[in-house]
């Protein structure tokens, strides 16, 4: 930032001049010295004049963040600690805007000042419980945006950073089905939005003075079945990070000529890890590419020269990657990404670990994990099933697997596993299935519907009781979640539909695969009592089945619930992940 480099290591934040020797490094903050043990640094924001730094930290067993404001004088001094903060940005040298969550949801935006008259005041309150509020500063630091988003619509308010105490200005009133995000350049708003047909992301622009959607002009439209992963604005370029049928691309749009350069990235890459670009005038876009078995590798794209630079060669790994498509019940083709050891022979005898998620338009996590590489070296096959409900093929892929389409994700998962077995990738008795959080819905549903396809299931903090959760509006996220699962309280059709696939409500006496569930004592999103009920019902169903068969020697599968005192829903401990593998 500016002429300095700020970096974090082992719970400390350091600063050095970008052209200084390696030895001249200044310690700005130590979480240990402040009494925050095992703290994780989540976000760092530097004020425009580099006099203040705001840092959010959290412990490993809670989702609650604290914001530490440090003032840089002769030596760094902690000026203020703001408890319970989610997102925050500097509007000016000493005015910090931040959101404050309650019951996992942010509805309030506040501002705080730190020179002269220290005070905090309320700026914005969201009244609709389906919406979540966060804040963002445009790359040119002209505006701070207050973003209020539900799962299907958005509303953005602009705060003029040169006059942060003025009332925010509305860009476009929320409209059902229209999501939008705002950037700024040369007195024009660049708007990433689903407005218009088809309902996929488009880049549009409009003058700041007439920002209603009737004035939005199309700059660029994504092609069909394309997932927009991230977007970075620079002074004269917009860089889009894209995924199309499992392959990663950069699309670089000139904001001067509106020409588009499309760069296909290496075939081994499965995920982007974008790097922070606080400098609006930068001429190089830095990012990392990774895969479940390939550690992140640094790349740089030269915007003016239109040149991609691989800054380090990938590690040579003895692993094949195969991309397949399974035909689902309605003839739709579902992508699968498969990894296996290049030296493996007789793949039908090798163990297979199938990954699934399929919710909220979120892709399966395909970033590097050391334990995945260990499995490959041990001869395992890893398969990632990109079922509907996830976001791998764009917004329509999510829409086709949520609400009254949720069963399509289950049909997709079954088709993927059957194709893998047909093609000689393992067999049912050597197949395990893994899912976390909302991935537990499809994994648990498959256990009920087709338990003979798999031998074992590993679930991390799984969502397995959709119906009771969606009937309980006292839970923090139930109303917000209605746009993903439907509202059984208002519509009897959703009551019956959710009941038809809900893992908890469809447990029956039969042979189940073995199940390992990891839960966290402090998990606010997946309460422990629901998982205890699920495990109790599952064990009873297995005992009832064994009793009815009355055959000696029948193996009763293991149902293991591993409750951890540490960790939380969003940051499970790395050691737990390793132990599960």
Image: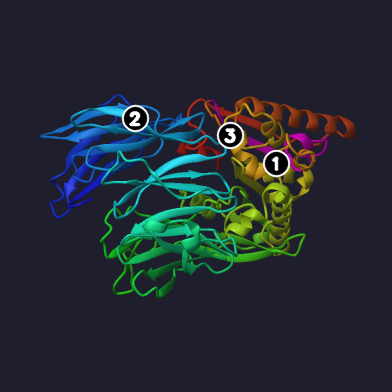
To which quarter of the image does residue 529 belong? top right
Tag 3 near tag 1, CB within 8 Å:
no
How far across and down, in percent of the image, does residue 480 sit? 59, 38
Is 77 positioned to the left or the right of 370 in the image? Answer: left
Q: Which residues are magenta?
A: 499-521
Along the viewing direction, whichever of 579 and 527 lies nearer the viewer = 527
Q: Please give the residue where the numbered disc 2 appears in the rendered image.
A: 121
Along the viewing direction, whichever of 327 and 83 lies nearer the viewer = 83
- Nearer to us of marks 2 and 3 is 2
Q: Please give the residue where the numbered disc 3 appears in the rendered image.
A: 477
Assess disc 1: are there few (<14), some (14-19) or many (≥20) residues with their C-alpha within 10 Å of its C-alpha: many
- Residue at position x 54%, y 58% from top? 194
Assess disc 2: are there few (<14), some (14-19) or many (≥20) residues with their C-alpha within 10 Å of its C-alpha: few
For the C terminus, the image quarter is top right
- Residue at position x 52%, y 61% from top? 201
Along the viewing direction, whichever of 510 and 166 lies nearer the viewer = 166
Label 2, label 3: how many angstroms apart (C-alpha)? 27 Å
């Amino acid at each position: 930032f500016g002429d300095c480099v700020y970096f974090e290591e082992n719970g400390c934040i350091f600063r050095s001049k970008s052209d200084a020797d390696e030895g001249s490094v200044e310690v700005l903050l130590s979480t240990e010295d402040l009494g925050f043990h095992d703290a994780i640094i989540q976000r760092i924001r530097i004020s425009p004049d580099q006099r203040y730094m705001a840092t959010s930290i959290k412990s490993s067993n809670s989702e609650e963040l604290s914001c530490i404001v440090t003032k840089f004088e002769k030596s760094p001094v902690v000026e203020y600690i703001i408890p319970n903060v989610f997102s925050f940005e500097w509007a000016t040298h000493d005015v910090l805007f931040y959101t404050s969550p309650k019951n996992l949801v942010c509805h309030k935006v506040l501002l705080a000042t730190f020179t002269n008259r220290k005070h905090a005041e309320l700026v914005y309150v969201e009244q609709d419980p389906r919406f979540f509020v966060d804040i963002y500063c445009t790359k040119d630091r002209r505006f701070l945006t207050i973003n209020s988003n539900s799962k299907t619509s958005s509303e953005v308010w602009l705060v003029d950073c040169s006059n942060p105490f003025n009332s925010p200005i509305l860009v476009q009133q929320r409209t059902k089905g229209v999501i939008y995000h705002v950037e700024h350049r040369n007195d024009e708003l660049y708007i990433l939005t689903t407005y218009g047909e088809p309902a996929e992301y488009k880049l549009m622009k409009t003058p700041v003075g007439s920002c209603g959607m009737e004035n939005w002009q199309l700059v660029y439209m994504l092609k069909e079945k394309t997932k927009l992963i991230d977007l970075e604005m620079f002074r004269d370029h917009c860089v889009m990070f894209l995924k199309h049928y499992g392959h990663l691309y950069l699309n670089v749009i000139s904001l001067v000529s509106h020409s588009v350069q499309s760069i296909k990235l290496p075939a081994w890459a499965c995920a982007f890890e974008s790097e922070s670009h606080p400098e609006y005038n930068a001429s190089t876009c830095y990012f990392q590419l990774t895969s479940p078995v390939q550690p992140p590798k640094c790349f740089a794209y030269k915007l003016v020269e239109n040149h991609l630079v691989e800054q380090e060669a990938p590690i040579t790994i003895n692993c094949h990657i195969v991309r397949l498509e399974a035909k689902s019940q309605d003839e739709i083709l579902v992508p699968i990404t498969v990894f296996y050891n290049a030296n493996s022979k007789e793949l039908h005898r090798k163990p297979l670990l199938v990954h699934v998620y399929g919710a909220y338009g979120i892709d399966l996590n395909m970033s590097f994990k050391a334990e995945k590489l260990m499995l490959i070296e041990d001869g395992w096959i890893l398969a990632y099933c990109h079922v509907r409900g996830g976001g791998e093929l764009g917004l329509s892929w999510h829409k086709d697997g949520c609400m009254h389409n949720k069963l399509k994700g289950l049909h997709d998962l079954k088709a993927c596993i059957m194709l893998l077995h047909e093609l000689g990738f393992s067999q049912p008795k050597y197949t395990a299935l893994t899912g976390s959080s909302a991935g537990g819905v499809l994994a648990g549903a498959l256990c009920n519907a087709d338990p003979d396809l798999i031998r074992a299931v590993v679930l991390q903090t799984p969502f397995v009781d959709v119906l009771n959760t969606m009937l309980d509006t006292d839970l923090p996220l139930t109303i917000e979640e209605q746009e993903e699962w439907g509202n059984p309280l208002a519509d009897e059709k959703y009551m019956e539909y959710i009941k038809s696939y809900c893992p908890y409500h469809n447990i029956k006496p039969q042979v189940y695969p073995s199940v390992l569930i990891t839960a966290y004592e402090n998990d606010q999103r997946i309460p422990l009592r629901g998982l205890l009920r699920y495990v109790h019902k599952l064990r009873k169903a297995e005992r009832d089945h064994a009793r009815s068969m009355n055959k000696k020697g029948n193996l009763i599968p293991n149902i293991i619930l591993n409750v951890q005192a540490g960790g939380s829903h969003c940051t499970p401990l790395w050691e737990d992940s390793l132990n599960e593998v």
